[in-house]
Amino acid sequence: MALTITVNRWQYSTTNKWHISSTFGNIVYQTPSKSVKDRDTSAVFICTHNIGSYFQMMWYKQTQGTLGFKLMGNLNGETDQIETEFKNKIFLNGNGRRNGTLTIKNLTVDDSAVYFCAAYDTVL
């Protein structure tokens, strides 16, 4: 259930390409499975689930060499809440009840990470 953005540092200096791949879980799905992005462009990831009682979708970032995850933001129904650190970096769209989109803007080397989407229930 992880979406991974990695930067090939050898190609970075000559082609400015980003290598993006993802893996899938059983109930919560993330796409795309693989794509290549240019530096200073945006990456768009889609998270879907089919768990009828789950209303929230959370996005997390795990950076290589660090322990734990950083919460980037969430969709509670159609309402997004982005953590302060990511306010100028990401955009969330969709509905936590079914599907959501994470857009990471202006890709840089600092965006190399594993990105996780998680869905869970909550009291509205």
Image: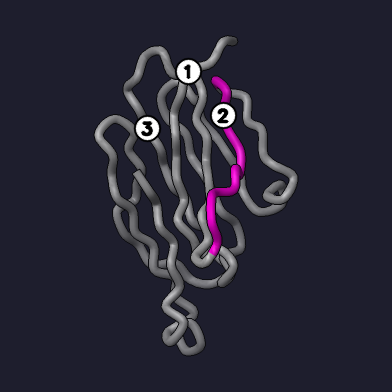
Q: Amino acid at mark 3?
A: Thr
Identified at 36% across, 43% down, the residue is 30
Disc 2 or 1, which lies upstream in sequence? Answer: 2
Quadrant for the C terminus in the image: top right
Tell me residue 63's x, y (percent): 53, 61
Identified at 74% across, 45% down, the residue is 84
Q: Amino acid at mark 2?
A: Leu
Q: Amino acid at mark 1?
A: Asp
Disc 3 or 1, which lies upstream in sequence? Answer: 3
Residue of label 3: 48
Real-space Cα distance between discs 2 and 1? Answer: 12 Å
Residue of label 1: 121
Q: Residue furthest right?
A: 84
Tell me residue 17's x, y (percent): 44, 75
Identified at 55% across, 35% down, the residue is 93
Secondary element under disc 1, as helix, strand or loop, is loop
The reply to whether the C-beta atoms of the residues labelled 2 and 1 are less than 8 Å apart is no
Q: Is residue 15 magenta?
A: no
Residue numbers of the magenta segment: 66-77
Disc 3 or 2, which lies upstream in sequence? Answer: 3
Secondary element under disc 3, as helix, strand or loop, is strand
- Structural crowding at the residue carrying mark 2, measured as other residues with C-alpha within 10 Å and reported as few (<14), some (14–19) or many (≥20): many
Identified at 72% across, 50% down, the residue is 85
Question: Against 19, is 16 above or below?
Answer: below
Secondary element under disc 2, as helix, strand or loop, is strand
Residue of label 2: 75
